[in-house]
Image (spheres, rainbow, N blue to C red):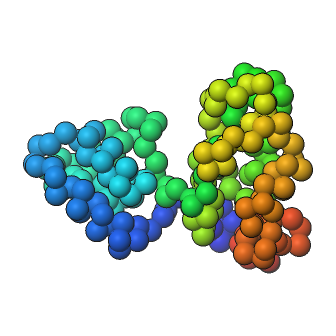
């Protein structure tokens, strides 16, 4: 968070992640397939850190701008690290009609992040997806690959309890029921 309370998207890459990028790129030669390299790095590391994209550029002999341009062209690449727990809120037609947006808003409030973001402790990632194929259970949230249907704001809280967030480690344990972020003087 910045001093003004705005979230920044600058994530630091852990040394082991940079090492994994280097090892992955060892299989590629100068002039190699950039898209294949991006896919391989993301599969290994889980995301495309800025420092990792610099390594890709150097190894393939292309500019950093080219690497970034190709990576941002495709929507399959992540530029923030994934959380240990993946939460996907379905916004397909059935879920949309059954007010999936309210479920997404509940997750945002409880985790203190927006869709496409990861909590600062890298515990949770929140994504919006088009359809998970469980229309009869709408609205649906997928937690770590397991579909949870007929979601309500209360069931968001229940899932957080079930997954241990309420034990004092995470945002849900704060007094106001949401994450404490930034300076209390803000």
Which residue is depicted at the point 60% across and 69% down?
Answer: 121
Q: How many marks?
A: 0
Taking depth in this image into account, of 49 and 90 the one nearest to the observer is: 90
Q: Is residue 28 above or below residue 1?
A: above
Residue 176: x %, y % from top left:
89, 67
Residue 140: x %, y % from top left:
74, 36
Whether residue 39 appears in this view of the structure is yes
**Outermost residue to the left:** 30
> Would residue 145 be found to the left or right of residue 158 on screen?
left
Q: Is residue 96 above or below residue 23?
A: above
> Would residue 103 be found to the left or right of residue 83 on screen?
right
Q: Quadrant of residue 152?
A: top right
Which residue is depicted at the point 28% across and 68% down?
Answer: 19
Q: Is residue 36 above or below residue 81?
A: above
Residue 79: x %, y % from top left:
45, 52
Which residue is depicted at the point 28% across and 39% down?
Answer: 35
Instruction: Give the quarter of the figure containing the N terminus.
Output: bottom right
């Amino acid at each position: 968070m910045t001093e003004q309370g705005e979230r920044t998207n600058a994530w630091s890459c852990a040394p082991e992640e940079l090492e994994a990028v280097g090892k992955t790129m060892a299989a590629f030669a100068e002039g190699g397939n950039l898209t294949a390299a991006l896919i391989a790095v993301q599969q290994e590391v889980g995301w495309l850190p800025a420092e990792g994209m610099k390594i890709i550029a150097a190894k393939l002999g292309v500019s950093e701008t080219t690497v970034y341009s190709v990576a941002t062209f495709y929507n399959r690449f992540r530029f923030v690290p994934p959380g240990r727990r993946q939460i996907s809120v379905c916004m397909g037609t059935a879920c949309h009609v059954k007010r999936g947006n309210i479920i997404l808003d509940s997750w945002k409030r409880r985790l203190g992040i927006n869709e496409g973001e990861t909590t600062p402790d890298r515990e949770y990632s929140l994504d919006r997806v088009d359809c998970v194929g469980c229309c009869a259970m709408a609205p649906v949230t997928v937690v770590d690959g397991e579909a949870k249907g007929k979601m309500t704001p209360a069931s968001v809280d229940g899932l957080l309890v079930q997954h241990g967030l309420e034990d004092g480690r995470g945002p849900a344990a704060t007094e106001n029921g949401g994450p404490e972020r930034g300076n209390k003087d803000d």
